[in-house]
Image: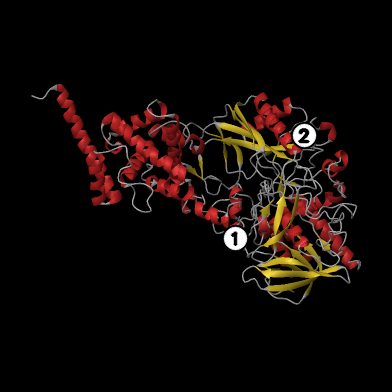
Amino acid sequence: MTTDLYIHESDQEYDAIVVGSGITGGWAAKEFCERGMQTLMIERGRVVEHRKDYITEGKGPWEFENRTKVDNLLIEEKFAVQKKCYAFSDTTKHFFGNDKDLPYSTEEGTGFDWIRANQLGGKSLLWHRQSYRLSDFDFSANKADGHGNDWPIRYKDLESWYSYVEKFAGISGSNEGLEQLPDSEFLPPFDMTAPELHVKQKIEQQFPGRHMIMGRTAHLTQPTQLHLEQGRVSCQARNECQKGCSFGAYFSTQSSTLPAAAKTGNLSIAPNSVVHSLIYDEKTQRVKGVRVVDNDNLSTREYFAKVVFLCASTLGSAQIMLNTKTKSFPNGIANSSGVLGHYLMDHNYNAGATGTVEGFDDKYFSGRRPSGILVPNFQYKPSLYKKNYVRGYGLAGGSHRDNWQGNAQQTGIGADYKDKLNKPGKWSMGLHAQGEMLPRFDNYMALHPTKTDKWGIPLIHIDCTWSDNEKLMMADAEQTAFDMLTKIGLTEVRSYNSIGKNNPGLAIHELGTARMGRDPKDSVLNSFNQCHDVANLFVPDGSSFCSSAVQNPSLTFMAMTVRAVDYCVKEMKARRI
Amino acid sequence: MPTHSNEIELENKTDDQDNRRLFMKKMVALFGATTATAVMSGCSQFSMQRPNPPKNGQLLSEHESTVLYSLCETILPKTDTPSAVEVGCHEFVPHQLQHCHSEKQQNDCIHIINTVDIQADKAFSKSFVLLQPSQQQQLLVDFESSSVSTLNEKKQFSFLKALIVFGYFTSELGATKALNYQPVPGGFIGSIPINSATKSWSPQAYY
């Protein structure tokens, strides 16, 4: 039994080291612990305790000096990149990485917006919680049209693991029977508003093959016994999730996997431990542990284990691997293929349209729904592709009823104007593209040849750009969203395409730097997220993706992680690892 | 014997003195007696230049602060809910501009505050702060919609107005009394019936 959850120094050889504590790391730790394995979770940042450290939760806007906006000087000094995230505000800034301490570089003429959340729980505290399964069309897309390598897994390999994680995490949504977006194990879906139900009916009537469904999200709309046992209760529809949620109503490491892992008594956590590199034994051709630099005082220490799971994020995990240079791996551990760091992807959220929905003045909603609607990808196989580009996009969005924020822009002075501001205004509806980004060797991250961070680790250097395929897709998505809203009768329809303005990165779906594959010559990981070159090193996070698909990837991180742990523990017991 | 027109003039003068007295009271409450007197004496000799530039660290001069104060009261006056001044918008605006907005936006706001005052001077030969509430209202209505202002000035005014509105509805009274405050909704219901008196929900998930 572990007596103290948090450790500093340890000579112990753990069964498993899990680097990272976000969605992937939390699941890996829970699964190892529940299989009786002594597990050390390593987190580079500080401890964030569930409830206790949600310091801004429940506060009104007036309780912040700048009414939830962040001071210019502070942004300039510490958050020049993080400020671009939609969830960044004075109410959440303590959960975002500090850009001053966490520099990275990009190739001249390119840009990449890298959003960081370096604390216990990682981005599981900040995520958008949308949760979707990939389909077989996604797993076979690379093979079907020749972009990227073939995924070494198919839907059937993950299906039961999806079910397993969904039941535990709690995913709300509706059964739709769509072949491109398999149904999950659902809690009840959130409601649609009256204008959304209207728009859904019109879209499905006028655009055969296009559907509009309620967003699937990791919120407890109706908790089961499994959730109550985790100490979680129903979603209160505050939609202030990124401040932290003491109801535990959305899935995070803190609300869900961490308490489950800790309950086993097999979990230890080493916070403030920045992993520098892996310790590799040339003789056994195995990793033995990790080298760590203390986040605060920069002292160094080592931790040891029989297996290592890298769950440090797509860029973070690849950075650790690239920085582990050994005699047999001069270009980074498990990188005999030379593809480590390459095929970096994000999603492309850069086009869409909004319009006014006439009527429904006497209809309103109650509560702040922490989710939106989705038009699932309707170009999910080659026969449905557009002529001038490959792959497709989903359209996410929802209705909005104007309030003082929009009404403020209208003309008016005095009592009548003030009275109007208090009242709900017009209904509008938006559809925003979530496009697939192709895996390309040319989009990559590497270690900077000379610059290092304050922990002495080489900076990540990123060269990642939108290709013509992504640009053509957004141009089409803009037109399509505009046409859809116009054809179903919305007025004042306006569209946008921001691909020329936005760097990759802001969808916060970095994927693909240590891709899976059947062939060790062109991939880093096998079908169980195990390194081809190093049998006791696994990477189950977003690094492993062969294609981005269009779905929000976190649910797939969860399913792949539990599958990888299950496989790893069986291999350990069979003494093959 | 006073003529008819003189009577009107006299009436106006009395109103004006009342207005001046009322405003003086507010200014004393706001800035203290010395400053208020200085501001009032400066009001009559308004020039195109920025009068009495702000003291160190302040975004607005004392005179500009008084104009902003009057703008806040005119745009969102006291009704069955508090006025913008009662929730402190006249203090919020310069604070927010200094901390969260660009230099250009700061300058635009300073410019538009002075421009409104110049308009008042042109139309009524008085500072905006000394006009009757109905004159203040009419001046701003005209400023928003007629040719007395340029398109750019209209945009600048709209920005300042939106900032006052933001300050109002993110204040405690604005968020909890002027709107239907629902800090913990308890769940989401997609459709509920409402009537023309129903207020919008508050707070917002994102501001």
Q: Which quadrant of the structure image shows residue B22? A: top left
| Extreme residue toward the left, this view | B1
Q: Which residue is mark 2?
A: A378
Q: Which residue is mark 1?
A: A51
From the viewer's perspective, is residue B57 above or below residue A298? above
Q: Give the secondary structure at mark 2.
A: loop
Q: Earlier in the sequence, mark 2 or mark 1?
A: 1
Indicate which disc residue A235 carries: none
Question: What's the colour scheme?
Answer: secondary structure
Question: Measured from the top left, where is residue B10 in percent x and y?
Answer: 16, 30
B74 relative to A154 in the view: left or right: left
Residue B171, visible in the rendered structure: no
- Label 2 neighbour load within 10 Å: few <14, some 14-19, many 20+: some
Q: Are labels 2 and 1 on one chain?
A: yes
A459, A509: nearer the viewer: A459
Quadrant where the N terminus of chain A is found in the figure: bottom right
Q: Which quadrant of the structure image shows residue B178? A: top left
Please name the amino acid that badge 2 sits on. Answer: Phe
Question: Mark 2 falls within which chain?
Answer: A
- Label 1 neighbour load within 10 Å: few <14, some 14-19, many 20+: some
Q: Which quadrant of the structure image shows residue A248? A: bottom right
Q: Give the secondary structure at mark 1.
A: loop
Please name the amino acid that badge 1 sits on. Answer: Arg
Question: Mark 1 falls within which chain?
Answer: A
